[in-house]
C-alpha cells in the first residue's frame, strides 16, 4: 500500500479536483449550484412546515397561502434537484473517464523499457490504478460535493436545534463521533483488503480469460483442461470472496451498533419534545421542526461521515493511479539526449553483464562483441544462452547492469530510446498477432509509411505473404480475428491465418522498416515449412546484403552465410568466426551443426560431409527429413 498520510491524501485530492475541473468545468459548476440548493432545501422545508402548522393552530391567516406555496416550491426542489445532479454526474463521469484513461495509458506508454512490464507488483498496481481511474476521481468529487451539501444541511439544522434545545446539539454530535472513527477505520481496512487480494483477482481473470481465449481453446479442449482451469479460477475467486466477506461482517457489526446509538438518541429527543409540548413549552410547529432537525442533523452527520469514509477509501485507492501516472520511467532517459547518427562504423557490446534483478542469475556475463557496419552477425546457442536478452539490450529495452552498448562509439544510454528505435527493424521470436486487418497488422511496423498502401504491399511481397493476403475475402482489409466483427453492417467475423502466415506477416511488419540502419531477425522462420523457410531466407539474404543485421535461428543452415557467427553459452561468448572457421575448429558450433545435418542423412551419421549435405538439400527433401 502507498503512503496514506494527510499530506499524501491532500495531494491526491488536489489531483482529483484538477482532473474534474479539466474534464468538465461546466458540470462542476452546475453541481456546486445544485449542492447549495439541495443543502438548503431540507432546512427550508422544515421551517416552512413549522410556520404552516403554527399558522393553522392559531386559526390561520392571509399568509398561509404564501407559506403553502413556498413549501410546495421547496418540496418540488427536493424532487427535481436529485435528477439534475444525476445528469451532471453523468456528464462529469464521461469527461473524467476519457481524461483519466488518456493520462493513465499515456504514462504507461511513456516508459521506454520493459522492466516494469515483467514485474508482477507493477501489474497488481496497474490493475488497481485502472480500477481506481474508473471510479475514484468521480467518487472523490461526488463525495466532496455531498459532504459540502451535508455541512450546509447540518449547519441549518444545528441552528434550529440550538434555538429549541442546545443540549440536544451536543448529544447528537457526541453520538456521531464514534461513527466517524469506525467509518475511517473501515475505509483503511477496505483499501488494505483490495491491495491484499489484487494478485488473486488478476489470477482469477487470467484463468477466466484462458477459458474463453481462442488461442487457448484448442489445448483446453484437447487436453481436457476446462475443469482444471475452472477450479483454479473458482479457488482464486473464493479467496477474494472470503476477504470481502470478512470485511462485510466487520462493516455490518460496526455500522449496526452505530445505528442503534443514533436511534436511541433520536428516541430520547422525541420523548423530550413530546413532554415539552404537553407542558406548553413547545408549540406543535416547534415539535415538528425539532423532530425534523434531530433527524436532519443525524442524517447529515451520517452522510458526512459516510461520504468522507468513501472519499477516504477512494483517495487511498487513487494513490495507485497517481503512483503510476507520476512515476518516472523505469528506463532512464537522458535529460539532454545525444544526437543519434546513422550507423557508419558498427555496434559494440563492451564487457556487458546483465540480469533481470538481483534475485536472478546473470544472463550475460562479460560479453564483448563488435557488429561491423554492413555485415551480418549470427547468434547461436541453446535455449537460455542469452541470445534474446542480447537483442533486448540492442533495442535498449533494458540497460546493461555493467558495461555498455555503443553505437558508433556513443553509449545507447546517452541517446533517446525513440531515436534509437527509429533506426531499427526487428522481428521478435514472440511476435504479436493483432486482432486488426491485414493491412493494419503490417502498417504498425511504420505508422508514417503505412499511410501508403503500396508500401504495405511491398513489405508483404518481401516477406512472401502478399499472395495469401490478396486472396482473402476483403484482401488486405480483411479482419484477422475471430473474436471481433469487421466494420460495416453485416457483422461478419474475420478470418485467422496459419502460424506460418502470421510469422510472415510479422516479418512484413518489420520489413516496413527495410531502410533502417540495423535489422534484427530473432527466429524469423521458426514456424515455416521447409519450402517457405527456404524462400524467406533467400529473400532475406538479398534484402540484408550490404546492411547491418543480427540473426538468430536454431536452424543453423539459415545462418551459415553470415559474416560472423557467435556462439553463446551460459551468457558468455564461447566461439566466434565464419561457418568454415567454426566447422574447422570442431567445437560447439560444429557439434550442433553436425547434429542437425545428421537428420538429413539416411544413416543418421553426421560427419564432415554433413554440412555439404545440408547445403545442397532441396526444399522438398528437407521437408521429408523433418
Image: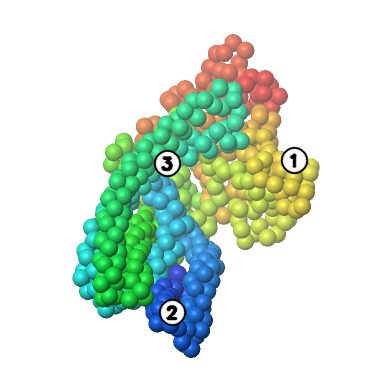
**Helix, strand or loop under label 2:** helix
> Is 47 drawn above or below residue 575 in the view shown?
below
- Residue at image location 71% in from the left, 49% down from the top: 486
Using a 10 Å C-alpha cutoff, classify the residue at mark 3 as few (fewer than 14 neighbours), some (14 to 19) or many (20 or more). many
**370 shown above or below 136:** above
Q: How many marks?
A: 3
Picture coordinates of residue 76, whole percent (x, y):
52, 74
Of tags 1 and 3, the one toward the viewer is: 3
Q: Mark 1 Cα within 10 Å, few/some/many (few <14, many 20+)?
A: few
Image position of 52 (left or right of 173): right
Identify the residue shown where x is 27% and y is 78%.
163
Q: Position of residue 556 (x, y in %)?
A: 54, 30
Residue 86: assigned label: none
Question: In this orientation, does residue 471 appear?
Answer: yes
Name the residue rendered at 49%, 35% in the picture. 207
Its colouring scheme is rainbow
Between the C-alphas of marks 2 and 1, the distance is 89 Å
Q: Which residue is mark 1?
A: 468
Q: Nearer the viewer, mark 2 or mark 1?
A: 2
The answer to whether 43 appears left or right of 216 in the picture is: left
Q: Residue at x 77, y 43 (%)?
A: 472
The first of marks 2 and 3 along the sequence is 2
Q: Is residue 520 left or right of residue 59?
A: right
| Foreground: disc 2 or disc 3 | 2
Please give the residue where the numbered disc 2 appears in the rendered image: 56
Q: Disc 1 versus disc 3: distance between alpha carbons?
A: 41 Å
In the rendered image, the quadrant that contains the C terminus is top right
Which residue is identified by label 3?
Answer: 201
Numbered disc 1: secondary structure: helix
- Nearest the viewer among 576 and 84 is 84
State which tag comes first along the sequence, 2 or 1: 2
| Residue placed most toward the observer, 283 or 327 | 283
Amino acid at each position: 500500500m502507498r503512503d496514506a498520510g494527510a499530506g499524501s491524501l491532500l495531494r491526491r485530492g488536489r489531483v482529483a479536483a484538477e482532473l474534474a475541473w479539466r474534464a468538465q468545468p461546466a458540470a462542476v459548476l452546475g453541481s456546486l449550484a445544485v449542492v447549495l440548493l439541495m443543502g438548503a432545501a431540507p432546512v427550508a422545508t422544515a421551517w416552512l412546515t413549522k410556520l404552516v402548522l403554527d399558522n393553522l393552530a392559531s386559526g390561520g391567516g392571509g399568509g398561509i397561502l404564501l407559506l403553502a406555496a413556498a413549501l410546495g416550491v421547496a418540496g418540488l426542489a427536493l424532487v427535481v434537484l436529485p435528477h439534475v445532479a444525476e445528469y451532471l454526474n453523468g456528464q462529469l463521469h464521461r469527461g473524467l473517464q476519457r481524461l483519466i484513461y488518456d493520462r493513465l495509458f499515456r504514462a504507461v506508454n511513456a516508459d521506454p523499457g520493459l522492466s516494469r512490464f515483467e514485474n508482477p507488483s507493477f501489474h497488481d498496481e496497474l490493475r488497481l490504478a485502472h480500477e481506481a481511474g474508473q471510479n475514484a476521481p468521480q467518487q472523490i468529487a461526488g463525495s466532496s460535493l455531498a459532504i459540502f451539501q451535508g455541512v450546509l444541511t447540518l449547519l441549518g439544522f444545528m441552528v434550529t436545534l440550538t434555538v429549541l434545545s442546545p443540549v440536544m446539539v451536543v448529544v447528537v454530535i457526541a453520538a456521531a463521533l464514534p461513527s466517524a472513527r469506525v467509518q475511517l477505520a473501515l475505509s483503511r481496512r477496505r483499501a488494505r483488503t483490495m491491495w491484499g487480494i489484487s494478485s488473486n483477482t488478476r489470477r482469477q481473470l487470467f484463468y477466466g480469460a484462458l477459458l474463453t481465449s481462442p488461442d487457448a481453446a484448442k489445448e483446453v479442449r484437447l487436453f481436457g483442461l476446462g475443469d482444471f482451469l475452472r477450479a483454479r479460477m473458482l479457488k482464486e475467486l473464493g479467496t477474494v470472496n472470503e476477504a470481502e466477506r470478512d470485511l462485510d461482517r466487520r462493516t455490518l457489526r460496526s455500522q449496526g451498533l452505530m445505528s442503534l446509538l443514533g436511534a436511541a438518541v433520536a428516541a430520547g429527543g422525541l420523548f423530550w419534545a413530546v413532554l415539552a409540548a404537553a407542558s406548553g413549552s413547545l408549540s406543535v410547529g416547534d415539535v415538528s421542526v425539532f423532530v425534523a432537525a434531530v433527524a436532519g442533523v443525524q442524517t447529515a452527520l451520517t452522510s458526512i461521515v459516510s461520504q468522507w469514509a468513501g472519499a477516504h477509501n477512494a483517495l487511498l485507492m487513487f494513490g495507485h493511479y497517481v503512483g503510476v501516472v507520476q512515476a518516472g520511467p523505469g528506463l532512464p532517459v537522458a535529460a539532454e539526449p545525444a544526437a543519434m547518427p546513422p550507423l557508419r562504423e558498427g555496434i559494440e557490446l563492451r564487457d556487458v553483464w546483465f540480469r533481470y534483478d538481483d534475485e536472478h542469475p546473470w544472463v550475460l556475463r562479460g560479453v564483448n562483441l563488435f557488429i561491423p557496419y554492413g555485415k551480418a552477425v549470427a547468434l547461436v546457442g541453446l535455449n537460455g544462452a542469452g541470445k534474446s536478452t542480447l537483442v533486448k539490450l540492442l533495442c535498449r529495452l533494458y540497460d546493461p547492469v555493467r558495461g555498455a552498448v555503443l553505437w558508433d562509439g556513443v553509449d545507447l544510454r546517452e541517446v533517446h530510446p525513440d531515436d534509437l528505435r527509429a533506426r531499427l527493424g526487428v522481428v521478435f521470436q514472440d511476435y504479436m498477432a493483432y486482432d486488426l486487418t491485414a493491412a493494419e497488422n503490417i502498417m504498425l511496423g511504420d505508422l508514417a509509411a503505412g499511410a501508403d498502401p503500396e508500401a504495405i504491399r511491398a513489405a508483404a511481397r518481401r516477406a512472401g505473404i502478399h499472395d495469401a493476403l490478396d486472396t482473402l475475402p476483403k484482401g488486405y482489409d480483411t479482419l484477422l480475428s475471430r473474436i471481433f466483427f469487421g466494420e460495416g453492417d453485416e457483422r461478419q467475423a474475420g478470418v485467422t491465418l496459419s502460424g506460418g502466415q502470421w510469422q510472415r506477416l510479422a516479418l512484413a511488419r518489420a520489413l516496413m522498416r527495410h531502410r533502417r540502419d540495423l535489422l534484427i531477425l530473432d527466429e524469423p522462420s521458426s514456424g515455416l515449412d521447409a519450402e517457405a523457410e527456404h524462400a524467406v531466407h533467400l529473400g532475406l539474404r538479398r534484402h540484408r546484403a550490404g546492411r547491418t543485421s543480427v540473426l538468430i535461428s536454431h536452424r543453423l543452415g539459415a545462418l551459415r552465410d553470415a559474416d560472423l557467427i557467435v556462439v553463446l553459452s551460459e551468457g558468455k561468448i564461447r566461439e566466434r568466426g565464419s561457418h568454415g572457421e567454426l566447422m574447422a575448429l570442431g567445437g560447439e558450433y560444429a557439434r550442433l551443426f553436425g547434429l542437425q545435418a545428421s537428420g538429413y542423412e539416411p544413416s543418421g551419421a553426421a560427419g564432415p560431409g554433413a554440412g555439404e549435405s545440408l547445403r545442397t538439400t532441396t526444399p522438398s527433401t528437407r521437408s521429408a527429413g523433418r
